Image (cartoon, rainbow, N blue to C red):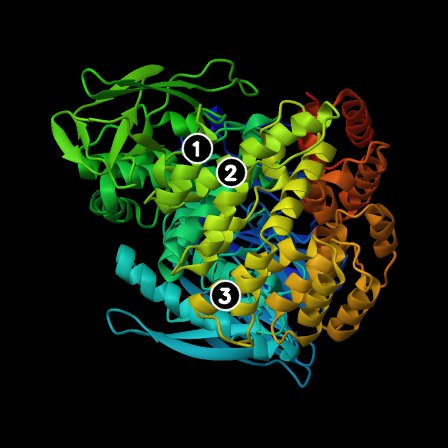
Amino acid sequence: PQTVYLKDYTPPEYLIETVELNFDLDEQLTIVRSSLSLQRNPQSKHQNLALSLMGEELQLISLAIDGVSLDEDEYTLDKESLLIHKVPQDRAFQLKIENSISPAANTALEGLYLSSQMLCTQCEAQGFRKITWFLDRPDVMSRYKVTLSAAKDKYPVLLSNGNKIAGGDIDQNRHWVTWEDPFAKPSYLFALVAGQLEAVSDEFVTHSGRRIELQIFVESHNVDKCAHAMQSLKNAMRWDEETYGLEYDLDLYMIVAVDHFNMGAMENKGLNIFNTKFVLARPDTATDSDYEYIEGVIGHEYFHNWTGNRITCRDWFQLSLKEGFTVFRDQQFSADRSSKAVKRIADVNALRTRQFAEDAGPLAHPVRPEAYIEINNFYTLTVYEKGAEVVRMLHTLLGPEGFRKGCDLYFARHDGQAVTCEDFVNALETANQADFSQFWLWYSQAGTPVLDVTEHYDAANQQLHLTIKQSCPATPGQAQKAPFHIPVKLGLLSDDGSAAPIWFNQQSSNEITLHVTAAEQTFSFANLAQAPVVSLLRGFSAPVILKMERSLEDLAFLLRHDSDTFNRWEAGQQLAIKVIFELIKNLQNQQALQLTPLLVDAWRNILQDKFSDLSYQAMLLSLPEESYLAGLMEVIDVDAIHEAREFVRISLAKQLQTEFQRLYTLYHRDESGNFQADAIGRRRLKNICLNYLISLETPENYELAERQFYSAGNMTDQMAALATIANSRHPAKARSLDSFYHQWRREALVIDKWFALQATSSMPNTFATVQSLMRHHAFDIKTPNRVRALIGAFSQSNPVNFHAKNGEGYAFLADQVLVLNDLNPQIASRMVTGLAQWRRYDEERQILMKQQLQRIVSYAHLSKDVYEIASKSLA
Ligand code: B3K
Ligand code: ZN
């Protein structure tokens, strides 16, 4: 397969001003008639008389230019393109294409496909070319007019982008609708939907007084699960007006929820298409976290209307221009809507466990990549999550007002254009007279920077000296790295826990941002009569690994007193990590385990302190996840990590049982349907207590979990109880799982949870369970949500069982990857990730994982998607 390089970018040779599309929809055979008004791009320097259009898996019916049909010798057709040998050069011309496609045969879920009974599209990144031949690249922006015709009974609802301008009956059985989108857009934002759908409607009045119609389309049995998504949409629209001064531009905003979707959702202009998982919620079917994810994703897709649609990407290397920025915006939105502290911790947690691993492994790439084989493989944690951190640092460096000024300039300058990451950074620079030339390295250098910090207190001069060394490990294709511009937020604490004034450059404040720009730098702080306790990288002000020798006592102190909510939580995590790693060492040396009273005291303090934000208190009590611990280990020892962490959980439960029980009883009440932050907090805190308590494996605590499971009136409590049961030796495990299945067998999204719960159990017989679940009649390999719930969850979130020493997990995953490869390459390549980190394990496991990767690479009909991930993992 071919590699595409950023350095080879050239402007398009032709532009397409308007597109008229006509679809004769049918699941077996859809006829597409496309009429394009084309002209040579004045920006393009080449002299080619030919026109090359992209197209895949299409059947050509006819071709004509300005009404004259083309003979077979006037064009060349191959698997991925249509080359028309000669087209008019000095004027605009009309190209008419007629072709057919087969939606029902499309299992890759890219282009036009069938989901349950409805037809829908997914075009980003390069799916439009599976609908018709086109200049399928984001820098070709056109105005679309789309006519859909279909059978009335099967497809009563016919949707596309923009506004509905006409419609009617063809005959008794068929009807048609025409849609027009007044905004020029790239082809990846095109969408159509046809099906038996019900609309839930509402409206939003914009800042300037325009009335926008809002519609969420779902299958009729889901109409009662749309209220939260609708409210989230209205919240997002208001928030973007207030925070960025951005108003919605069309008169209609539609969201369609479909069962079969390769990712979360898609921001098609005026017609978002969503995975049902990020739309549907009812208190008894969705957890508190589901509610939060839905709000976040609805917001994300809405925010794309400006950051992505009005201003789009010049080429796919610029993906983070829209994704990193839009993730940052949705994070800000969610933080404003709920608890800032908790949202930040959750985001950092995800970044550090998953993106850091990506950045440290064979698939590491810069936020703006320079080469790809399959662009779908670059919708990564690095482009999205690290990209958002990069925008967040810009926000930190400029401050909220400066950042907003920069964004205003970006929107004013580039509205209606397809631009680059440089254009974005440049607008922020110009508006603020800033210089981000060194900062730019965050876009071009891969890898997670490491900060090595040493402190030295000079009592005689009452000064504190902090020496910060930065480095960044080599990543594929980048052996040497230049120093980054890293904003490091700092606070100092006196020994009574209060803030010590920071005297820096003759000025005093309680918190400052240090600009770390050199490989090694020393910062000095004056007027400190006593050595302070340093609180560094507050709010996780940069996506780096902070290394600083700290005593358990200092960490416990910060956990009690740090006024920065992120660093307070982080101190507790570091404390637990230090303790767990000591225990891992003991385990590896076959020594007896003992838990230091210091950790017990620290956890007791959290349990006894008063918190206004109980979600935050629950987070303070959570032990670092096994996958995060794994990322910190030279050679990952999955069993020792699990055993040591379990030992800590059980020991804390034993010694603090009364406290856990007290809080459990205090906050266990029936308030299902209440989604206020305080009610969510009570559920989170109570359920983490339950999680500790059940580890004691006593009849009374088993009973507690079972009672909660059967009496819960909301999914959060029911799932929390079932999860603890599934992860224990609870005698009623089989019965509870069965009962859950029968209760929810008609709710696909709940059944996904049921699969995932069993797939992630750390109990010893899990692999056998996974194998039998693969044969369960509710399992369907063509439904991405189900694949992620079973195969994805097992291989990515069940370290002890997936990494079983005999290699059965690896062989199983490779088997499934090869099956998926033939059906849905995008999903297949996502599943390979479970094997990509093979170098991090012991030698026997390395050999076994590598064998499976080699088996995958040597498969005869390997897709580009899987080939790229598997071969880069082996390289
Ligand atoms: N832009 C889409 C992702 C498309 C993925 C294509 N493989 C969703 C989003 O980020 O909003
Ligand atoms: Zn996005």
Location of residue 445 with respect to 184 vertically, above or below: above
Q: Amino acid at mark 3?
A: Arg
Distance of label 2 from label 3 (alpha carbons)? 27 Å
Residue extending farthest left: 506
Disc 2 vs disc 1: Cβ atoms closer than 8 Å? yes
Is residue 242 left or right of 184 when viewed as pictured?
left
Relative image position of residue 295 (x, y in whole percent): 47, 62
Circle 1 residue: 553
Instruction: Provide residue 73's location: percent of width, then percent of height.
Output: 67, 39
222 with respect to 532 (left or right):
right
Q: Secondary structure at mark 3?
A: helix
The local crowd at label 2, few if under 14, some if 14 to 19, many if 20 or more residues have their Cα within 10 Å, is some
Residue 661 occupies quadrant: bottom right
**Residue occupied by mark 3:** 682
The answer to whether marks 1 and 3 mark residues whose Cβ atoms lie closer than 8 Å is no
Does residue 445 appear to the left or right of 414 in the view shown?
A: right
Q: Is residue 41 visible?
A: no
**Relative to residue 205, is residue 138 drawn left or right?**
right
Respond yes or no on whether mark 3 lies under 8 Å from ligand 1: no
Q: Earlier in the sequence, mark 1 or mark 3?
A: 1
Lower sequence index among marks 2 and 3: 2
Q: Which residue is mark 2?
A: 598
Q: CA distance from mark 2 to mark 1?
A: 8 Å
Per the image, label 2 sits on a secondary structure element best described as: helix
Which quadrant of the structure image shows residue 643?
A: top right
Q: Which residue lies at the image location 80% right of the left edge and 59% below the top edge?
A: 779
